[in-house]
Image (cartoon, helix red, strand yellow):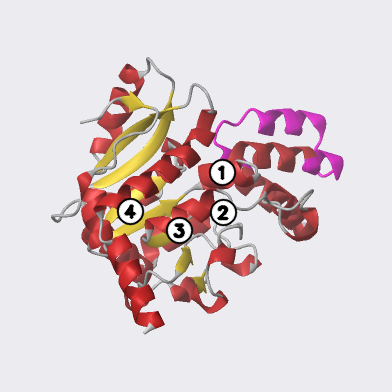
Amino acid sequence: MSNGISRIPKVPDEIKTAINNDTLSVFIGAGVSTLVGCKGWDALARNLVNRCHEEDIINFREKDTLSQIQDHKKTITICYHIFHNNHLADVFYEEMNKALKEKDFVEKPVETPNIYDDIIKLRGLFITTNADTHFDRLFNQPNIFYRDSDFREDRLDRTNLYHIHGSVKDRTSLIFTVSAYMQRYTQNMEFRRFLGRIFREYTVLFLGYGVAEFEILEFILRESSRNPAPKHFMLSGFFSGEENILSYEQAYYNDLGINILGYEKDAKGYRQLAEVIRYWNEEINQVTGYLHDASRLIDEAIE
């Protein structure tokens, strides 16, 4: 059942317990990266269609038709093939880097500290479906995994960051076409075991996800739901008074074993998520063993 909508939702006891037991996994979606300046799927799709027209590889009618497609990942897939078939793959990746504010396409440096500085304090096993590198700065380079061969059960470690849809650091690692999604989630058994173990053995917290981004993860969530598993949670923004909308969405997510924690976005929009995480860290540090462990480690270092 949902807990209603509040400015700062209560930290579930299951998450506090998971942190103490080193069994919290945090999945990070596109909604988090937009808070540090990245474009969403909708903006990237729109920019790609416009660029196809600017490069004169589609006409205005085709541009108008592609612009009407509501499935943004479908649009991105189509545009990728259009660019590729016209020997303009570099233009596609240029637009992607712009959307993710990477390398030479950063208009201004991403401000720090930002939401990622608070997310890492949750001390979980961090999985991201984002291809940008804005979270990477908080990890040692050898502990950042994004290639297909990296996702193995024996590499599950809280010191690592897993880009399960690839990273812009390596074009060949990127997962954004329908065929690439299907291959990874339905045919790559090592990858399925990797995610399946996480959903079975960890309490998962989803940050920055919408319904559309769960289309592929459903494969693993439904598979793991056949076995007893920890309860999973998702922080999601709603306007005050949208309790009915929250309950409708909860009906959908219940089938995936996910409980929605609604936060109020009236004042700050989705940026309220950053405030929620900040308050959660304060509460978690008061009631878990983190401060005790941190104090012990400092004392041991001084001795």
Coordinates of residue 94 in the picture (x, y in percent): 76, 55
**In the rendered image, which residue does mark 2 sit on?**
176
SS at circle 2: loop
Which residue type does callout 3 highlight? Ile
Check residue 73 in the rendering and tell me which mark sits there, or answer none: 1
Residue in front for this viewpoint, 34 or 182? 34
Coordinates of residue 134 in the picture (x, y in percent): 61, 57
Task: Give the mark count.
Answer: 4
Looking at marks 3 and 2 on the same chain, the residue that comes earlier in the sequence is marked by 3
Cα separation, mark 2 vs mark 4, equals 37 Å
Q: Residues within 10 Å of mark 4 (few under 14, many from 20)?
A: some
SS at circle 4: helix
Which residue type does callout 2 highlight? Phe
Quarter location, residue 182:
bottom left
Q: Which residues are magenta?
A: 51-75
Cα separation, mark 1 vs mark 4, equals 39 Å
**In the rendered image, which residue does mark 3 sit on?**
120
Residue at far bottom of view? 303
Residue 259 in sight from this viewpoint: yes
Q: Are marks 2 and 4 in contact (CB under 8 Å)?
A: no
| Magenta stretch encompasses residue 63 | yes
Disc nearest the viewer among 1 and 4: 4
**Left or right position of 226 against 122:** left
Cα separation, mark 3 vs mark 2, equals 26 Å
Q: Are marks 2 and 1 in contact (CB under 8 Å)?
A: yes
Residue in front for this viewpoint, 218 or 111? 111
Looking at marks 2 and 1 on the same chain, the residue that comes earlier in the sequence is marked by 1
Q: Is residue 183 above or below residue 301?
A: above
